Amino acid sequence: MSEVEVITACENVCRDYFWLLNADPRVIQGMLTVGAAIIAAIVTLHIAKSVYPVQKNKDREIKIDEEKRVVFREFLKSVDMIINQRLYNETVSKIDAYREFKSALNEVLIFSDPETAKKMWELYENVSQYAAELSQFPQEGAIDYSLVRDAKDAADASFRSAINAARKELGLAELELRINLAVLSASQADQS
């Protein structure tokens, strides 16, 4: 039998890569540069294929939530205008308040989830009924709430329900507080 030469792993590596010791440093530097470029390209491709779409989707969701906040805020502001529209002196202002109220509701119906849209629609109906009841009283006269108590209670309940539905849709905690609509008297409106 022939004798087999036994070498260690270290000796094997030294024999295989001995040429690197004799290589020009510029060649080694060039190979390292190409290797770094390949690694950078692979990392960039990974980011472009997996991380970027996730981040883009998150940004899109945040933008939609921002738009929903604006739409909900405008709708709830218009609720106040409708409730207190009896204090307006001009018919044009009253018509503008109703137009803005309905326009804001339309935007809510476009952007919101079906459950939130239903709550906002109920608020629209109850507030419209309540505003119609309130508009029967003269500006300077005292409002007899016993005549409009049912409409006020329904509007207040719808208001709380709509606010909590909007907060839930936006990922916020529901309010435990008892929130009621703010109905101004003519003297309070003059002060503000």
Image (spheres, rainbow, N blue to C red):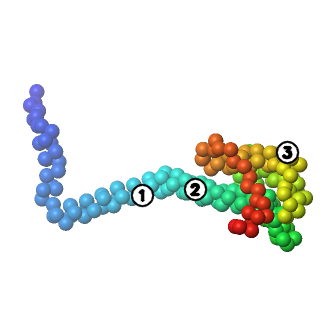
Cα–Cα span, label 2 and label 3: 39 Å
Res 150 label:
3
Which residue is located at x 74 percent, y 52 percent? 181
Q: Please, what is the three-letter code of the amino acid marked with disc 3?
A: Asp
Q: Nearer the viewer, residue 1 or 164?
A: 164
Q: Please, what is the three-letter code of the amino acid marked with disc 1?
A: Thr
Q: Nearer the viewer, residue 15 or 56?
A: 56
Question: Which callout, 1 or 2, points to the residue nearer the camera?
Answer: 2
Identify residue for label 2.
Answer: 62
Q: Residue furthest right?
A: 136
Report the side of 21 relative to 184 (left or right). left
Identify residue for label 1.
Answer: 44
Q: Please, what is the three-letter code of the amino acid marked with disc 2?
A: Ile
Cα–Cα span, label 1 and label 2: 25 Å
Which residue is located at x 82 percent, y 68 percent? 88
Could you say whether the residue bearing mark 2 is in a helix, strand or loop? helix
Residue 108 visible in the current orientation: no
**Disc nearer the start of the sequence (1/2):** 1
